[in-house]
Image: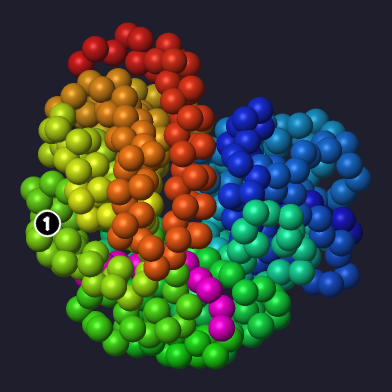
Amino acid sequence: MKILLISPAVDSETRTNKGLMIPQLGLYILKGLTPPEHEVKIIEEEINNIDLDQECNLVAISCMTANSHRAYELCQEFKKRGKTVVIGGVHPTILPDEALQHADSVVVGEAEGVWEILLNDFQNNNLKRRYCNPLPDLTKYIPKDFAKITRKRLFHVIPIITSRGCPYDCDFCCVTNLFGKQIRHVPVENVVRDIKESGAKNFIFLDDNIIGHPKYAKALFKAIKPLKIKWVGQASLSLLVSDKELLQLAAESGCKSLFIGIESVSEQQLQTMPKAINKIEQLERALKNVKKMGILVHASMIFGFDNDPKEIFNESVRFLIKNRVGTASFNVLTPYPGTKVYEDLKNENRLITTDWRYYDHNTVVFKPRNMTPYELQIGKIDARQKFYSILSVLNRALGNLYNPIIYFTLNYGHIKQVKVEAKRIAKLKSELFENIHE
Ligand code: SF4
């Protein structure tokens, strides 16, 4: 049978820069889990158009919150054409009843252990409405299929995941809700096998925290060191700096850049989070140590916490420039369904909209405490513009000369995105903020 695996665009009219798109790993895991007698076609809509009339027996769509609207549109189009549609991913896992209003069946949680059953049921005309295998054991073989990952992107980066689950359960994050409190790992030898089979040299580890389990991380870094790859990933700063050997091994195994969730430069805010580093001075020392190892720091910032004053935007930019941080993303607090923040803001009647298209961590969808929604929106865009000004890029370059090509290429990519974001603001003002002044 012919199966279409689709990752929808957030907005099919204005797609993300093709070259910067990371392949959607979930689709390749599904392809790997599909028995070989079936023909599978993967479509990532941010990169390729979808032919709604193409021949196929089953359509499977994987989506997050921001692209769930487009996913539901696609469900409707395919169903109109007589196709059976299955949906899964983060958003349908959190809101399966909503997803079932659009699709014939929903996969709640991870696909391992249910995908083959679902295909079998479909072939026997016995498709169930829901499939769920809570917290599958990742120590079992997890096949992936990297053969079809296109090489036409700017950076040919292969996504890899080594673990799922997080013990911290932060108020604004649904990872613990999705994957459980316990960290589950793919065996190191399977990760090594995937890297070798891909034939690639550049990788992105998609783990929420690649060093969340230091013993596993050390074994992984030692095992991949001889492969001479380059990789980027996400890591918690506190673990990295409290364990010198871990940082050393990460650098030796090819780590070129780490995405670090700094979130806030307000000590008052940091103290409300499960973070071991919650003083600015400690933060600065920790960043210095990571950079000393030749690892470029990508800082992730969040604006809109209840503790945030109006000065938070300038304070954050000053901190990032002073510490010569390589790149940074500026997000607004987004109350994703399934998080405590969502429940709190809903109960306090502070949500501006539940149109999921705006739940993209770039758009303000709630009333912040110490400023208006529009001030938060403008403050976030302004902070990004200041951080990526030519003067700031040149100033920060002085602290990132160990990786000049990566540094300038990434900063150039962000400068382009800043322009796209600035253009969006007039549209947003009329769509969301016109009648909200508090
Ligand atoms: S934000 Fe990071 S540490 Fe907190 S729950 Fe999510 S993945 Fe875990």
Residue 9 image offset from top left, x and y in percent: 63, 39
Can you say whether 352 is above or below 225 in the image? above
Q: Under tag 1, what secondary structure? A: helix
In the picture, measured across the screen, residue 35 lies left or right of residue 422, that is right
Residue located 18% across and 24% down the image: 371
In the picture, measured across the screen, residue 183 lies left or right of residue 277, that is right
Does the segment drawn in magenta span residue 232? yes
Q: Nearer the viewer, residue 154 or 86?
A: 154
Does the segment drawn in magenta span residue 309? no
The image quarter containing residue 53 is top right
- The amino acid type found where label 1 is placed reads Ile
Quadrant holding the N terminus:
bottom right
Residue 217 image offset from top left, x and y in percent: 39, 82
Can you say whether 404 is above or below 20 in the image? below
Q: Which residue is mark 1?
A: 280
Q: Which residues are magenta?
A: 228-239
In the picture, measured across the screen, residue 389 lies left or right of residue 200, that is left
Residue located 16% across and 40% down the image: 315
